[in-house]
Image: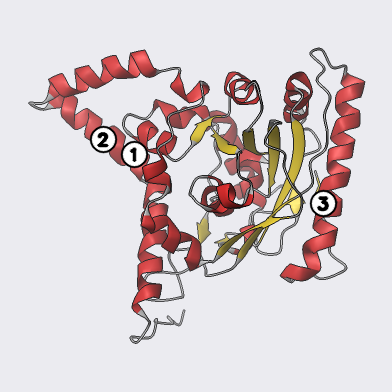
Amino acid sequence: MKVEFAPINIPLKRRIQTVAVLQWIFSFLLLAEFCCGFFVILILGNFWFLAVLYLLWLYLDWGTPCAGGRRSQWVRSWTVWKYFREYFPIHLIKTSELNPNHNYLLGFHPHGVLVAGAFGNFCTDPPFKNLFPGLTPYLHIMPIWFGCPFFREYIMSAGMVSASKESVSHVLNNEGGGHASVIVIGGAEESLNAHPGSLTLNILKRKGFIKMALKHGAHLVPVFSFGENELFKQVANPKGSWLRNVQEKLQKIMGFALPLFHARGIFQYSFGLIPYRQPIHTVVGSPIPVKQNLNPTTEEIDQLHALYLQKLKKLFEEHKSNYGIPAHKSLIFE
């Protein structure tokens, strides 16, 4: 394989952008493990009493990820996130007003490999708050991450909360509105489909978010992130292959998927785990009004789910030509 090295005279700003993305990759892939290792060292070392104090704190604070988390405006406004967004770059596109007097459930598509668009737009400021003043976004992620010592504090400071039913209910129960639950509908399973050019969404059997919207009267908003699947390449894993079978079994056991992805490096463009510089355009669609129904029937859930799919497809079709999607390509729902 011929290695393509980066030019020496690259502007300093682009170097800083690459470093910003590198720290994000480290945070996403290794920081949780590093924090757990550090906690073990504390327990086994001379500072075991600090670990005991933290365990006490963890016990007292265990429910916070399901109760709105503990965001930090300071962390969300770090300058490093500005360079992170500029690297790709990441853009948030508004197509309709979202009245802050309501609560909303935003369905984010597709998952991609590392959901860069969701993080850049909903966990850093100021993109979302500038376009949708009066709304506070909460990105729901797998509950397992909130069991990692120290790491949980970091992700909560960015505005991430648990994806449990209890957590979503807490966000959507806000009297007077102003809350926006952001759920990556396809989940970990969909990351295995995150190949460049892929438009396959795991959504046909995912109706829990529809039920939550009905029970809380939260307006549904489809969100499609163009470019999300273009950031990495994956080892070929077609359905039915031995690799895909292993990945799906591991996903069922661990709760999260393990896509074998690669892209570019820091000083060369041929291999590594740094995502490609591909623009991400996250388009926020128009809200679907939802009337509160504390005990929705299966038929009512299916009806709203069908409407959501219709609106999501319409959003994609209306904007695909703006972001390089050929006219003959359409979303595939599985």
Give me the disc on residue 33.
Answer: 1
Residue under circle 2? 37
Q: Residue at x 42, y 80 (%)?
A: 3
Q: Residue at x 52, y 70 (%)?
A: 277
Vertically, is 207 above or below 222? above
Closer to the camera in the image, 274 or 84: 84
Q: Residue at x 37, y 44 (%)?
A: 74
Percent x, y for residue 303? Answer: 91, 30
Percent x, y for residue 102? Answer: 71, 31
Percent x, y for residue 133? Answer: 61, 44
Per the image, label 3 sits on a secondary structure element best described as strand
Left or right of residue 275: residue 151: left
Vertically, is 164 above or below 323? above
Residue 154 visible in the displayed image = yes
Q: How many marks on residues?
A: 3
Left or right of residue 241: residue 327: right
Q: Quadrant of the C terminus?
A: top right
Amino acid found under the numbered disc labelled 1: Glu
Residue 206 visible in the displayed image = no
Residue under circle 3? 332
Which residue is the extreme one toward the left?
A: 46
User: CA separation, marks 2 and 3?
Assistant: 41 Å
Vertically, is 192 above or below 226? above
Closer to the camera in the image, 298 or 12: 12
Per the image, label 1 sits on a secondary structure element best described as helix
The part of the image, by quadrant, that contains residue 83 is bottom left
Amino acid found under the numbered disc labelled 2: Gly
Amino acid found under the numbered disc labelled 3: Ile
Percent x, y for residue 298? Answer: 88, 20
Crowding at dot 3, Cα within 10 Å, few <14 / some 14-19 / many 20+, comes out as few
In the rendered structure, are the residues bearing label 2 and label 1 in contact, judged by CB atoms less than 8 Å apart?
Answer: yes
Q: Residue at x 48, y 37 (%)?
A: 159
